[in-house]
Amino acid sequence: MQPIPWLLAVGSQKGGTGRTTTALALAWLGGAAGQRVALIDADPVQAAALVAAAPGQRCAWANVRLFAGMPTDDVPLAGCDLVIVDCPSLTEPAAQAVLCRADAVLLTCLPESYCLRTLPAAVAALAAARRDSARPELLGLLATGCRRDDPQHARWLAELRAAHGSLLLEPPVPWDRGLRDWPLTPGADLPVGAGAVAYRAVAEQVLAARLAGAGVR
Ligand SMILES: Nc1ncnc2c1ncn2[C@@H]1O[C@H](COP(=O)(O)OP(=O)(O)OP(=O)(O)O)[C@@H](O)[C@H]1O
Ligand SMILES: [Mg+2]
């Protein structure tokens, strides 16, 4: 079996937490930084593929190759520096197959009550994947879609920091109109804006983690 490059699974236990947007942004930024990136859309609804490429076209982003399906041995990942997987919901059995191959996991989370209170389901999925090995490592928890003008969002963010401060990736990704509208222009670059600024900081942390983990597998 050919060794596979460092694989980051972007997942969550609940729908609509920004995992597809996060996987897309990290793939785009990784490619723009000169990393050879494979973006694997492993969610059966295949929303990432709809954004990363115009209909019927290949992904035109610099250094990014797009695959739809599971990260199996058949996916030609040789030569990639970074593999980013948009996971199915972590409560789905298919997600276990991704987690078991992943080096690291980034959990996305909304600043809202349901998401905070269902986090144990994500932790349980991760624990199940780690039953037989120390992988995947939890890279962190990323809050997305945070509205600065919403005091309730601020309260939930504070709650997240209090409960999971050491795991929380900073900065949280703000709610950003450009990110919301990204799917309207399939194949478009990461929209410039406050969301992209936050994702750039997160991408630096991902690349640092990849370097720290490089060569282990
Ligand atoms: N930072 C943001 N600001 C504004 N809108 C956002 C942001 N992040 C994501 N969105 C929008 O929120 C919705 C959910 O995001 P996304 O599809 O990335 O989440 P998901 O966890 O992959 O959802 P699903 O469960 O459908 O797979 C989408 O319409 C997306 O465009
Ligand atoms: Mg999605």
Image: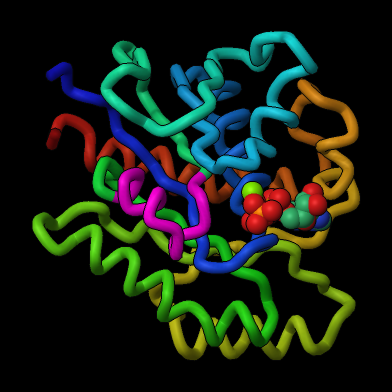
> In the visual, does 185 lie left or right of 174?
right
Q: Residue at x 24, y 58 (%)?
A: 129
Q: Which quadrant holds residue 183? A: top right
Q: Over which residues does the magenta segment extend?
A: 87-99
User: In percent of the image, x 56 and y 31: which residue is there?
Assistant: 27
Q: Quadrant of ligand 1?
A: bottom right
Residue nearest the viewer, comparing 178 with 100:
100
Question: Looking at the image, is 29 positioned above or below residue 204?
Answer: above
**Is 90 a magenta residue?**
yes
Q: Residue at x 50, y 90 (%)?
A: 162
| Rendered position, 149 above or below 63 | below
Residue visible at 50% across and 18% down in the picture: 34
Q: Is residue 151 magenta?
A: no
What colour scheme does the image use?
rainbow
The spot of residue 170 in percent (x, y) is 55, 63
Q: Which quadrant holds the C terminus? A: top left
| Residue 3 % position (x, y) | 17, 22
For the N terminus, the quadrant is top left
Task: Give coordinates of residue 144: x percent, y percent.
Answer: 67, 62
The residue sitting at the left extreme is: 132
Any part of residue 88 in sight: yes
